Image (tube, coloured by chain):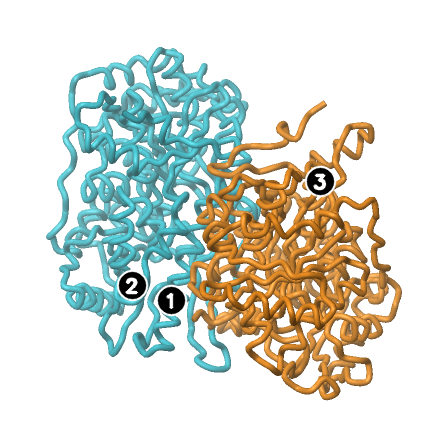
Chain colours: A cyan, B orange
Amino acid sequence: MATIDDFTSQYGLVKKIDAFGYLNQLKQNPNITRKHGKIVLVTADTPLKASRGEGKTTTTIALIDALRARGIDAAAVLRQPSMGITAAGSKGGASGGGKSSLSHPELIDWGLCGEMAAIEAAQNLLVSFAEKAIDEGKLDTVLVPRVSEVPSRSLRSIVVDAGKGDVPERMVLTPTCELMQIVVLSRSMQELETRVGNMVAGTLQDKPVLFKDLTELWRITNILTDAVKPALTETVAGSPVYVHGGPFANVSLGIPTLVSVEMAQTLHDVVVVEAGYGADAGAQKWLDIACREYDAPWPSAAVVVTRATTWRDDEALQWRYPFHVNRLEKLGIPTFPMINLWEGEDDLVPGLRELAAELGFRTPVAGNLFRDGGEALASQLDAIIDVLQADAVPTPGASHAGEDVLETVRWIAQHAYGVPAQRVVERDGFAQSLDEARGLASALGKDLNDFAVCAVKSPATMTDNDAAAEQDRTITLKKVEVRAGAGVVHVNLTSSLTTPMPKIV
Amino acid sequence: MATIDDFTSQYGLVKKIDAFGYLNQLKQNPNITRKHGKIVLVTADTPLKASRGEGKTTTTIALIDALRARGIDAAAVLRQPSMGITAAGSKGGASGGGKSSLSHPELIDWGLCGEMAAIEAAQNLLVSFAEKAIDEGKLDTVLVPRVSEVPSRSLRSIVVDAGKGDVPERMVLTPTCELMQIVVLSRSMQELETRVGNMVAGTLQDKPVLFKDLTELWRITNILTDAVKPALTETVAGSPVYVHGGPFANVSLGIPTLVSVEMAQTLHDVVVVEAGYGADAGAQKWLDIACREYDAPWPSAAVVVTRATTWRDDEALQWRYPFHVNRLEKLGIPTFPMINLWEGEDDLVPGLRELAAELGFRTPVAGNLFRDGGEALASQLDAIIDVLQADAVPTPGASHAGEDVLETVRWIAQHAYGVPAQRVVERDGFAQSLDEARGLASALGKDLNDFAVCAVKSPATMTDNDAAAEQDRTITLKKVEVRAGAGVVHVNLTSSLTTPMPKIV
């Protein structure tokens, strides 16, 4: 029988793994020995701004290094950072820092093995095929958007075929596109091809037309041959780290690919999954989309990272961190506060522990992980290890499939952002947008209520104004977009701007 | 001392070689043993249309397989095909066919290791930095174009920042962009960085502004870390093939990177360099730009591929094939006609040999290379091998640097396309375009006459009307574009359309 090594190839300084092939072999051969790793979800406080991370990746790396130092076979699964954003200088990379770093951060941050670029080419090729369909009279409007990994202010609003068709368009960042979502969710090339085929290319006489009726789908899947393979790299301490799937959980899924997590579970006893920006974005997407709707593994524990300054410095926003911790605990997930200290902050720890005790938290884990790496954590892990070594199997949350989309949105607002239904308001045009989405789903022979709801919002806010008093916080529903191939329905909420194509700073 | 293996890494099913590092080591250590391979240029008849190849890659593969069967250490250097064009279905790949194929054509044709995608991201990031400079008042116009590897009809003409700036733009195919030219021409990362720095970002109050005055250039070179490394693959018969640099010699350089050829020369006795579309595009660029202006190695022999049908079926265009063969012979390059036969054409060979004899050609090499591979050629190579084993060192052509650009254009028209100066005509606006280019060069402290002239034209035509009688053939000069980083000046000639962003077919 082939081993994982037989599905693994060297790609320069990293390895790539044919996860589809490997998991298929396990499925076909139920008697092959495998592990059933438990999931630790590493998420974070809502960031004060998108460009300032709390240190999720740094924590994830320190955590697996520390667990391995304690004799536990732990691995991490990370999302691939957006090279465009990193290269533009708008944000550092996402490969940890200092002693809690990947051994080759330059690879992870600067395009890895071309996965994102391949997804970009494939999604843009779909647009080209839609244009061809227009020329052939098979479409009269194109609905699939173009993408660019490199952010470019002036692409927010463009007119293509200028001087002839003059078609208004906008481009979105590659990691947020439907094809990336399909790569994140698909468990086989066949599933991926089916999902691409079910993407809506555009409309003909107001009726939606799918790519399976227009395009040779092998042209798309060929481009994605290597992009569907998770990369394997390691921390400077030598712990295994899988990297697969795009970021930006505030405007898309933004979670690691399901196959990368499931593959890691068969190989390790503990799999640390990074999900951010904050818990309201990454953890919400992992739990409420990946787990509830796509059968991804429910976490056995969670770690919520914050910087002392994020949690405490803005008094009006101090409610957010305890809200996240409590929300996860209420779901039955043992949740550990994690304080990622910057230089000069060591003496804040006693006060933070006191505050955590007052709030009824589990004992926080704290350390300067940049400076001290996993060593800062190793002695503080008893409680986490107890949870992971318990026999308890986590009880996954239930699916919302079939429930009215608007009810699911209200449920998310209440549970993930703390805003009850009566303060979830609809902006002018929302109802029409929702009706159109229902109509589109119907025209495809589907029920919109069976799609997974994907919230679209700013990374740094959960409500229309997080600084308002609790009873005054609202959420405004803005518009709805169907992604039939991925099986998700995007709902734009909160009045803050999203950044599908940011200006570089 | 490190060997070539120390500069070589496995990337999935291919290898990538740090050619910059390897060649630098050789340069620093003149006593290290190395080969000094002779160059065979494989080029072709002008194709009847862009989407129909004559079989240059097929021939190149068969030729090295045959040379190696004859005991000669031969390798090939190919350009990477445009994945966008292949995936769109507008053209087959460029990895040979049948018995004359690469062992992993799917890799070469479908994005290789992401080289083209990295160049695309880097060139588009330059546009983003130019936009940022506009926001900061450091530029008032952007001159660097956006690129896309995927062809998309509606991107020929776009308006960006629509509703605000409303800036008209067009996008060009990635392989044709200035950054690709810089990758093709650069012999070190330092040279590459300098050339990127010398790219014109745009203008401020009509004065050109360079990227070195706007941008941290390491952000661009970081993206290109792996893109500058040639890939190593092999033919189905096991012969080594290096792949590096983008296609489309009709509208850009379209030649393999200089380092890939020079590296291959140190490792093999014979290096077969593919250059197309036809001799008027690829061979013209290799000889008149790479060799004359950038010190690339002059060929010791040339092979000009044609299909029997291309050469003979269109009577009005029959002049082109002998013209190419004779032009190369006149340059002192022993030039071998090569007839690449399709199924059912074997019995054309005697007639073609007779025709070749009448025309004073060397004896043609002929075979069905798809069906028979290198075996079809092995017995026909005596004359080529004699040439390659002679002691003669080729005499490179002289540089045109310093010569008036217009004179160089007329020289190209005469020598490469057979149109004398008096029939090279200027379209309205050309003189002004040339003046502006001269002004731009001056403003940069340079002389336009020192730039290498890069002809831009249709792949399937050499003149305004190739089907006209010889004395009626003209060439129309249309416009001039300076690429200060690459050090080339583009001159659009002939009245036929070029395809910077083709519609997919």
Query: In the rendered structure, which amino acid carries the disc numbered 2?
Result: Phe
For this rendering, which residue is in front, B92 or B189? B92
Chain identity of mark 1: A
Query: In the rendered structure, which amino acid carries the disc numbered 1?
Result: Phe
Query: Which residue corresponds to the image point at 28% horizontal and 60% vertical from the top-left?
Result: A199
For this rendering, which residue is in front, B468 or A325? B468
In the rendered image, which residue does mark 3 sit on?
Answer: B269
For this rendering, which residue is in front, A207 or A67? A207
Query: In the rendered structure, which amino acid carries the disc numbered 3?
Result: Asp
Query: Which residue corresponds to the image point at 19% horizontal and 16% vertical from the top-left?
Result: A390
Query: Which residue corresponds to the image point at 31% horizontal and 19% vertical from the top-left?
Result: A363
In the rendered image, which residue does mark 2 sit on?
Answer: A211
Residue A129 is tagged as 1
Count of picture labels: 3
Residue B442 shows in this picture: no
Residue B396, image x, y percentages:
83, 55
Sequence-first disc among 1 and 2? 1
The CA distance from mark 3 to mark 1 is 45 Å
Helix, strand or loop status at disc 3: loop
For this rendering, which residue is in front, A264 or B273? B273
Asked whether, in this view, residue B399 is left or right of residue B193, the answer is: right
Chain identity of mark 2: A
Viewer-nearest of discs 3 and 2: 3
